[in-house]
Amino acid sequence: MMRKFFALVLAVTFVVPAAWAGEALPVPEKTGGMSLLQALSERHSSREFADTDLTPQQLSNLLWATAGVNRADGKRVYPVALGIQDTFVYVLNRKGVYKYDPAANVLTLIEKGDHRMETTLGQNFVGRAAVNLAYVHDTSLWEGKKTPEELIHQWGFVHTGAAVQNAYLYAASQGWNAVVRGSFDQEKLSGLLKLSKGQSVMMVQSIGPKP
Ligand SMILES: Cc1cc2nc3c(=O)[nH]c(=O)nc-3n(C[C@H](O)[C@H](O)[C@H](O)COP(=O)(O)O)c2cc1C
């Protein structure tokens, strides 16, 4: 009896947190907001950010608008080639580095601490943006499929571009600033995000309230 009790305590203490080092996000708000036409009118790139954080609700809304699930069958707010959801959003904020799980609406912790400046080759505003999103393409999900490699690569950019524009529009609708960035150190960022073979960073995007 005692042995079983200790086994249970051990499992709850070590096994459960190891398997689920995630942070549940609030349910995203999917109604209201600025009109789409107004958001399109206001979309632009800006590199000026207030050094403030998003609330969990704001972060959840932004991630859902960027790459969330919008149907019961698991499909997303942007179109996905052949239904292979090969593009992932990572979040870098003051607290840490996380991977967004759109189906579970959870952030999985990759690394603690403020690593935002590791997403740039030297653009200083990056460290002030509330969040930096890294878009990661995973070609390993296409293994065994007949799709030519070149198309898989092109489609990865299509997925990323669509999600990037979603995030721009959501930022515009909130009166925040945003800028997408192709200038970053692939090797350094892949290491920080703990990417494996077949995975690479396509773009990063700085988003947050204006100063
Ligand atoms: C593929 C791509 C790469 C970009 N890379 C960077 C970058 O590394 N750093 C940056 O500050 N802006 C970058 N930008 C933002 C552009 O400079 C910006 O979109 C452009 O000036 C047009 O301005 P707009 O977005 O306000 O229309 C990039 C944009 C695109 C589409």
Image (tube, rainbow, N blue to C red):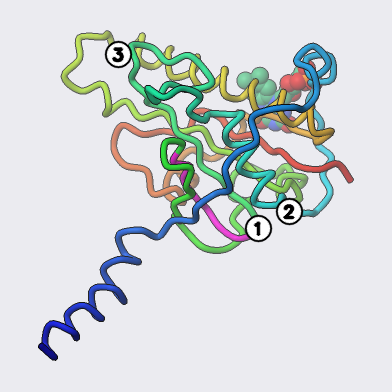
Indicate the position of residue 180 as horizontal and vertical percent values: 67, 29
Ligand 1 resides in the quarter of the picture at top right
Q: To which quarter of the image does residue 205 belong?
A: top right
Magenta residue span: 94-101
* Image location (x, y in percent) of residue 155: 42, 13
Q: Secondary structure at mark 2?
A: loop
Q: Are marks 1 and 3 in contact (CB under 8 Å)?
A: no
Contact check, label 2 and label 3, Cβ < 8 Å = no
Q: In the rendered structure, find residue 53 and report the number of the disc placed on it.
A: 2
For disc 1, the marked residue is 94
Q: Amino acid at mark 2?
A: Asp
Please, what is the three-letter code of the amino acid marked with disc 1?
Arg
Q: Residues within 10 Å of mark 2 (few under 14, many from 20)?
A: some
Q: Looking at the rendering, in which quadrant would you find the N terminus?
A: bottom left
**Which numbered tag is attached to residue 27?**
none
Left/right placement of residue 62 relative to residue 76 reads right
Instruction: Give the residue at x 39% y 49%.
Output: 194
Marks 1 and 3, how far apart in space? 36 Å
Residue plotted at (63% across, 52% down): 93
- Name the spot of residue 45 as percent of width and height, x first: 78, 26
How dense is the environment of label 1, judged by Cα within 10 Å: few (below 14), some, or many (20 and up)? Answer: many
Tell me: is circle 2 under 8 Å from ligand 1.
Answer: no
38 displayed left or right of 138: right
The quadrant where residue 28 appears: top right
Q: Between tags 1 and 2, which lies in front?
A: 2
Q: Which residue is mark 3?
A: 149
- Residue 20 among magenta residues: no
Q: How far is the residue under mark 2 from the one under mark 3? A: 39 Å
